[in-house]
Image (cartoon, rainbow, N blue to C red):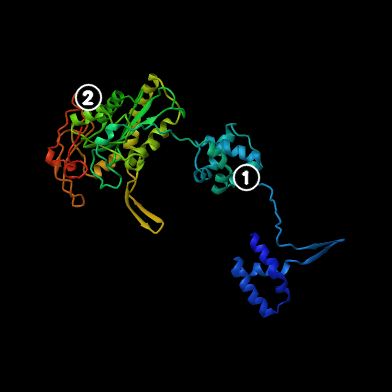
């Protein structure tokens, strides 16, 4: 901007003295140098250096100086305070959703005496656009921006566990599970505090969760075993990160005894375990939050909550699956499947069929060969998906030659 004003002072004298045809040529060169439109450039060159008589004073137009016109703010501190109150009552909705429900929030909060407003403030609140709401709440949203703390610590045993990355071809059949831990430290990772172990099926999105007192190996394995009992299917593989709570002898023996293939992510690559990372936010953090929990009574309360979320998340909350992703230059086009619940995904993929007398009415069928997934062969799970607690662990195992993981390069042998 400063260079443009200097150029204007250089060109203005010659522009005044030039003929009409010469002015047109000079105006083209000036527009090309400054980027101004032709009409604005003509006004700048015409007014620069002009003298104006104002009473006894002579004013000279100087293009090097800029006149700052300060418009008084439309939304004052009273409006901002009322907006923050409405935003808090709406459970901190985004600007678009908050603008859509502004009339409803204003009406209910004023009717019950929680937000006294005069007519002017009410009018300003109701006419706010989503962009204005986001701009006014920018400072408050930074104050309420919560995030967890990384607690992952590596272990030498991780080098003996095979790695599976997000770039490997996915095993798109039920039974390939992903696990992780969520810490309830309240923002201060000091002392002992409670943890939550989410278990997610990477194919259908089926999610189970269990709370533990600490992330000791025995507690984590016990919570994992409890989650697998509620999982309605046969477990093929288990994918975890590189933390000591998973890369230890307890979990290795647990998976080896049950013929479950154990894989791990690359260090510092959360996208290798993206399915369970997403559920940590949309399920655990959404319903539990970021408060600190560090007692056994809170562990019991969390487990009661997760038993209720087992029904809500898997039978009633729909999710979307990414079908394709195409990059065109810097633009990425993603195509998603229709939003469905994990239970719907299981039925659509041919995993369950209704049967009379089963505990919840579903049993594993015989899956036909899918041409798009050549590694999946014909297999049958002849036992019930979930059984009473006395027989839940008596699963029928696949023969070694029928296991689809056996033909993959990642998992050909196990080393313990």
**Number of marks present in the image shown:** 2
Q: Is residue 310 above or below residue 326?
A: above
- In which quadrant of the rendered image does the C terminus lie? top left
Of pointers 1 and 2, the one earlier in the residue sequence:
1
Mark 1 neighbour density, 10 Å: few (under 14) some (14–19) many (20 or more): few
Disc 1 secondary structure class: helix
Give the percent coordinates (x, y) of residue 251: 25, 29
Give the percent coordinates (x, y) of residue 40: 65, 67
Taking the spot 71% from the left edge, 70% from the top edge, the residue there is: 12
Image position of 13 (left or right of 215)? right
Taking the spot 62% from the left edge, 42% from the top edge, the residue there is: 122
Q: Are marks 1 and 2 in contact (CB under 8 Å)?
A: no
Mark 1 = which residue?
124
Mark 1 to mark 2 CA distance (whole Å):
60 Å
Q: Is residue 50 above or below residue 262?
A: below
Residue in the foreground of this view, choosing between 413 and 203: 413
Q: Residue furthest front?
A: 156
Give the percent coordinates (x, y) of residue 216: 32, 24
Q: Is residue 151 above or below residue 138?
A: above
Give the percent coordinates (x, y) of residue 356: 18, 34
Residue in the foreground of this view, choosing between 314 and 361: 314
Badge number at residue 211: none
Residue in the foreground of this view, choosing between 96 and 196: 196
Q: Residue furthest right?
A: 56
Badge number at residue 389: 2
Tell me the mark number nearer the camera, choosing from 1 and 2. 2
Mark 2 neighbour density, 10 Å: few (under 14) some (14–19) many (20 or more): few
Quarter where residue 102 is shown:
top right
Disc 2 secondary structure class: loop
- In which quadrant of the rendered image does the N terminus lie? bottom right
Taking the spot 24% from the left edge, 34% from the top edge, the residue there is: 232
């Amino acid at each position: 901007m400063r260079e443009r004003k200097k150029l204007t002072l250089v060109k203005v004298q010659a522009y005044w003295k030039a003929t009409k045809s010469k002015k047109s040529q000079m105006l083209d060169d000036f527009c090309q140098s400054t980027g101004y439109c032709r009409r604005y450039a003509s006004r700048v060159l015409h007014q620069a250096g002009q003298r104006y008589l104002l009473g006894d004073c002579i004013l000279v137009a100087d293009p090097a100086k800029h006149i700052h016109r300060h418009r008084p703010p439309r939304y004052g501190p009273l409006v901002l305070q009322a907006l923050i109150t409405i935003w808090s009552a709406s459970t901190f909705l985004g600007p678009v959703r908050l603008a859509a429900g502004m009339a409803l929030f204003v009406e209910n909060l004023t009717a019950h005496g929680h937000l006294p407003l005069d007519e002017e403030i009410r009018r300003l609140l109701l006419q706010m656009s989503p962009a204005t709401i986001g701009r006014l709440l920018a400072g408050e949203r930074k104050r309420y921006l919560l995030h967890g703390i990384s607690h992952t610590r590596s272990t030498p045993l991780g080098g003996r566990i095979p790695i599976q990355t997000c770039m490997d071809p996915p095993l798109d059949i039920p039974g390939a599970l992903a696990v992780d831990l969520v810490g309830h430290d309240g923002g201060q990772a000091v002392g002992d505090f409670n943890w939550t172990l989410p278990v997610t099926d990477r194919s259908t999105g089926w999610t189970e969760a269990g709370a533990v007192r600490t992330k000791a190996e025995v507690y984590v394995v016990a919570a994992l075993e409890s989650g697998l009992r509620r999982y309605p299917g046969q477990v093929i593989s288990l994918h975890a990160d590189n933390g000591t709570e998973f890369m230890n002898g307890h979990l290795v023996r647990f998976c080896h005894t049950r013929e479950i293939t154990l894989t791990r992510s690359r260090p510092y690559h959360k996208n290798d375990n993206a399915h369970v990372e997403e559920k940590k936010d949309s399920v655990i953090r959404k319903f539990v939050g970021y408060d600190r929990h560090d007692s056994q009574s809170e562990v019991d309360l969390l487990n009661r909550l997760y038993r209720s979320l087992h029904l809500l998340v898997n039978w009633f909350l729909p999710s979307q699956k990414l079908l394709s992703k195409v990059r065109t230059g810097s633009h990425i086009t993603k195509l998603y499947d229709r939003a469905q619940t994990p239970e719907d995904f299981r039925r659509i993929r041919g995993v369950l069929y209704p049967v009379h007398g089963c505990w919840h009415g579903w049993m594993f069928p015989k899956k036909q060969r899918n041409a798009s997934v050549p590694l999946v062969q014909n297999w049958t799970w002849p036992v019930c998906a979930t059984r009473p607690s006395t027989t839940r662990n008596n699963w029928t195992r696949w023969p070694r030659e029928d296991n689809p993981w056996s033909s993959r390069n990642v998992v050909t042998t196990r080393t313990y």
